[in-house]
Each structure stands twice: as structure tokens, then as C-alpha cells.
Image: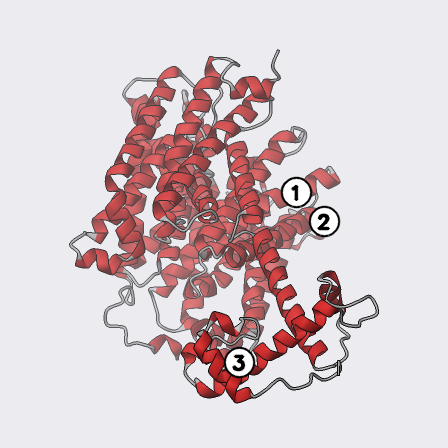
Amino acid sequence: MLDPFTSALLLQSGYNTALVAIGAALLGISAGSGGAFLFLRKRALVSDAVAHATLPGVGIAFMVMVALGSDGRNLLGLLLGSALSAGLGLLVVEWITRRTRLAEDAAIGAVLSVFFGFGIVLLTIIQTMARGKQAGLEGFLLGSTAGMLFQDAVIIAIGGACAIAALVLLRRPMTLVAFDPEFAAASGVSVRMVDLAMMGFVMAVTVIGLKIVGLVLIVAMLIIPSVTARFWTDRTERLVGIAGVIGGASGYVGAAISASAPGLPTGPIIVLVCFGSFAASLLLAPNRGVLASILRHRRFQVRVHRRQGLLALARGEPIFDPLTLAVLRRAGLIRKDGVATEAGRAQSAKVLRDERRWEIARQIHQDEAVSGRYDGLTPIEAVLTRDEIAEIDRRIGGPAPVGGVV
Amino acid sequence: MGDEFVQLSLTPLAIGVLAAVACALPGNFLILRRQALIGDAISHVVLPGIVVAFLITGKISTWPMMLGAAGASIVAVVLIEMIKRLGRIEPGAAMGVTFTSLFAAGVFLLEQSDTSSVHLDVEHALYGNLESLIWLSADGWGSLLDPQALADLPPELFRMTVVTLLIAVLTALFWRPLKLSTFDEGFASTLGIPTATLSFGLVGAAAIAAVAAFDAVGSIIVIAMFICPPAAARLMTNRLEAQVAWSIAFAAVSAVLGYVIAGYGPLWLGGTDAVSAAGMIATVSGMILGLTCLFAPHRSRIGVPPGSEQS
């Protein structure tokens, strides 16, 4: 007997759960990888406007379908309506940004709040309609996967597959526009069309995700995976791929968790799983992560203290800094009472010679190429050739007695 | 009609107008500083703050919730900054990560906890309950002079008044440094104005307005009022003083018109039930913005002499 979470993960806890998990994974893959381009284009929050703008479309589609005599719960019809109003919202954002002096963020905020507000008005009207009571349109706000039908899952799956296919086709122009719009325009790519295509993709993902994640949280599925992926790579193709994997895995695992116990809403759980992967990356990622940068800083600190401590030893100056003492002691360069060991004396003489060589080198080479490399840490052997160092040594003259150890 | 108006509509109208104005005032500066979406972010993160406050205290009471919401706003601001700095992520994406995750956490906590006994749910958080803030003990305009009836005014009215006054006083007090640092941050800091603190203070004031308004009217109005009236006002004039005045006017008109249309519109059209006032107020503010986008005197970039806003 498996516990509920594992059985949900293995698609063993019933037909509906399996449908939801597969749908959420497909949605996560397309949202994650598509959101990567949006993120690179630095327009992540446009998706927020698009997502909120779907609501009036859902309401109007429901009313139209009821007026035509159906019960108004056909998912395809509702999604069609939401796509239309999301498209309208997108065009309004474009129009305000291009035609008035308002900035894009103001346009996004205006469209988001007004479309959403109007959507809420429509929902309250629908609630008073005879059929509206059981419509369950509120489910689109935060997603509701209970009672998802097979045909709904098929729609989501087909939508997700189409979105991924479109992404594969458009990846080159999208990458170009995301990194260098001017160059893209100069090479004959229509930046406006690519931007619109990108937004059309966002719209498609939003519409597909309405049923599972809901319109308030779909933005998270578009943004968080690519921000997470950014911690792991500096290359576009990998960014898109990793974001897709993170999105898909979050969708799948989130849906499984939500199925394993009552009272765990699918949309928020998926988003929280996604955020968990983000938080882990923020802490643990190599190079860009917090832990990595703390370690890097620590290593640098040790190098500086070691070098300065050795210089102080060579010059016979007393050392007071506890960290310097600890670093030297740990490296076996000084004894417990602070007196230099054999190795310590050898190292400090070497460091002093390096410092002296640098001094001469900076007098000879006034140019940035050499003196710019001086940071008190880099050994001179890493910058100058052996002949140049020999020349410097000739200028320094013979070995002089080192203070303190005479 | 008059008596019923005082009893059922006067206080929601007043609260709506006050909330709209309190949000529109800081919104003016946020728009000019390209931080318009801060309002959006704040109104999302308020939810987990309120839910946590409820879980700790176990009841719906004002001050713990305000504190919780304020705490959540601070957590969000810190988180956004952290993601921006540590991960070298652009601000928009950092904001998107933060507020969606916090909102998801809020919904999750809400679903997990037993809130069936109290009026706390996601729908309430989104739409507010403007229509229910009625003044039951009023029986006509005379009640405005009756201390006993006045004592029974909805507490939201008092809170919203205090917050609106606070925001107005703060705006007036810091007018000059705010204006300077909004238009020319470098110049302002050479004058010795602490621009970073001021910027943080502005976001703080916006958070106070958002939390107070959120409590009374829901997050849709908060987002709409942060952005739509100031944006519309921005298209009407080149002077900041006039812009703020226009934005207050637009906010008040949106609130009144939206409330009236939501409450009485369906009746005029032969319906029986009112529609969401919060949604309608947002819709009206959007219509005002739409009209100014089409017709306002200073709507386009073309023909604006560079630097003329800096007067």
C-alpha cells in the first residue's frame, strides 16, 4: 500500500488525479520555457496584465453560451472568450505604451485592475442569473481541478503541445529580440511582430492554465521557473530548457501533493513548489547562489589575510588581527605563541620579494596592462615573464637581511 | 429615499471616496517613478499577512490584521530587494516571484485553516465588502447630528478617514523633497535629501493606504486607484500640483459614479440585484483613463518640450 503522495506521483490514485497531474506538468513545461523569453526581454509583468484580462472574457463567454441555450460550462467556449479578452487587454497595453506618454508599468497596472474589476462585475451579474449559481466561474480565479473532465484535460494537453511547438519554431527570432532588439530590427526581424507573438504565447499559456492554476497565480508559472533557471546557467538554450523542466516538475509534483490530502488547493501548491525550487537555487546554485558567494568571499578574505600576515611577519611587525593569526596558524606558518615557523619564514620572505618586485614593476610599466593587475594578491609570476622578473631582480640588487629574523 | 440613502449608501460612498483618494495620492509619485506596480504587489502580499494575523489571534480584529499586513509588506519589500541584489534579477521579475509566491502562501494558509466561522475568504480579499458597510442605526440626515447614531458608524469609516488624512498630511509635509527626488534624484541627493529613505517612505505610505483600503474595499480598488486616476491625471497636465488635484478628482468621481452605477444601475435596467461596487469603481476609473488617453490635452509624447515637467 503506497501513501497518498507517492501513489499520486505514480499516477496510481485515480483517473482524475492522473489527468490533473499530466495537465499540470504540460502546462508547467510550456509556461516555464515560454516565460524564459519574457524574462529575458524584461517584460515579465506584462503577463500579469494578460492573465487578469482573461476574466471578463470568461464571464462574457458564459453569458453568450447561456443565451444560446447551453449550460455555459463548455471549457473550450470559456477559454475562447478568455483568449479574446486577454488579447484585447494586451493590445490596450501596447496602445497605451505606444500612443500616450504613460510608461509600460502604468499601462500594465491599469489594464490589469480595470479588466479584472470589470470581470468581477460580470461575475456578480452571473451569480444572479438562474444558471449562474452552479457555474463555478470563481474556480478560474485560483484554479479548481476537482471534477476536471477528460475533454478538459485533452484541451489542456493539446494547447500545451501547440504552445511548445510554437516556441520551438520561434526560438531564434525570440532570442534575438530578447537580447538585442536594435540588432534584430537591423537584420530584418520585425521586433513588433516577435513581441506580439511572444505575448500571444503568454496568452495561450494563461488560457490553458486558467483551469488548473487560475488567473491570479498563472503569472508565477511564467516567471518563477525562468528566474530559477537563471541561477544555473548563462546560456539561453539551457535557460529555456531548465525553466521548462522546473516548470513541468513543479506542476507535476504540486498536483500530486495537492491530490494527496484534502484542503490543499492545486494552484497555490504548484506555485509554492515552484517557489521552493527557486529558494533552493537562490541558496545553493553554484556561482550565483548565496552559499557560493559567501564561500567565494570567505576564500578571498583568507587569501588577503594570509598575504598581509606574511608581509607583517617579513617586516617584523606585530600582528593583532585575530583572523590573520588564525589563518596563519592553521596553515602552519606561525606557532601558537605567534612566532614564525620555518615554513612561515620561507613564505614570508617569498611574499616580501614578490611585493618588492611589484613595486619595481609598477615603476617600469606605468601602463594599465601591468600595473592594473596589481591587487596585492596576484603573484608577479602570473603577469610577467621570467626575463622581465630577472631584470627586476637585477634592479633590486642582492638579498638583503630581512628585518626581525636576523 | 433620503433616509434610506443615509442608512445604506452614505457610509459606503464616503469610505469608497476616502479609500480611492488615499490610494491615488501616493499613486501620483509611484507612476512618475515608474513604480506603478508596487501597488499591485502590495495588494497581493497583504493577504498572507492578514491570514497569519488571523491564525495567531484567532479572530478578525483590526489592529493585528493591519500589523500582519504591514509585516507582510515589509517581508515582501525585503524579499524583492534580496532577489534583485543576490540573484542579479531585474526588478519586475523579482517582484513577480515575490508577490505571486506570497499570495499563493496566503491562499494555502486560508484553505488550511478553519475560517468558516468568520468572514475571511479569497473572494472577500479581492472584492472587499463595500456594500455591507452600512450605517444601520441611521434614520435620516438628522442622524449626522445624533451622537448615539454616530457612535454606531462602521469602524472602517473612522479608520479610512484617519489614514486618508495621514497620507494627505504626509504628502503635504514632504511635498518639496518628494517632488525633487521624483523628477531628479541626483539633484535631490546633492541638496542633501535622503532619497533612499524617502523612496522607502513612499512605498511605506502606499502600503498603509493599501492595507487600510484593502480592509474596507478589497484589492481590486486598491490596484485600480493606485494607477488609473494618477495616470489619467498625468495626461491632463504638466504640473505636478495640478496632476495631484486631477487625480483626487478622478478618484472621487470613480468612487461615487462606480458605487451609484453598481447599486442603482441594475435597478434602472430592470434587474433586481446590485453588482460588485468594487469592480464597478475600477471599471469607471478605467473608462476615465480611456477617455483621457483619447482626448486629454497632454496625452502624447510628441510636442512636449523636454524637461518642462520639472518646473
Q: Which residue does the image show at 60% across and 22% down from the upper left?
A: A261
Taking the view exactly as shown, the residue that stands out farthest to the right is A337
Q: Tell me, yes or no, whether the two marked residues, 1 and 2, touch with CB atoms within 8 Å.
A: yes
- Amino acid type of disc 1? Ser
Mark 2 belongs to chain:
B
Judged from the image, the secondary structure of the residue bearing numbered disc 2 is: helix
User: Residue B148 — which label?
Assistant: 2
Residue A266 image offset from top left, x and y in percent: 51, 28
Mark 1 belongs to chain:
B
What's the distance in space between the residues labelled 1 and 2, CA to CA?
A: 9 Å
Q: Which residue does the image show at 35% across and 35% down from the upper left?
A: A205
- Of tags 3 and 1, the one toward the viewer is 3
Taking the view exactly as shown, the residue that stands out farthest to the left is A188
Q: Tell me, yes or no, whether the two marked residues, 2 and 3, touch with CB atoms within 8 Å.
A: no
**In the figure, residue B200 lies in which quadrant?**
bottom right
User: Residue B137 — which label?
Assistant: 1
User: Residue A358 — which label?
Assistant: 3
- Of tags 2 and 3, the one toward the viewer is 3
User: Does residue B116 lie above or below A53 as drawn?
Assistant: above
Residue A326 image offset from top left, x and y in percent: 75, 64
Judged from the image, the secondary structure of the residue bearing numbered disc 3 is: helix
User: Residue B23 — which label?
Assistant: none
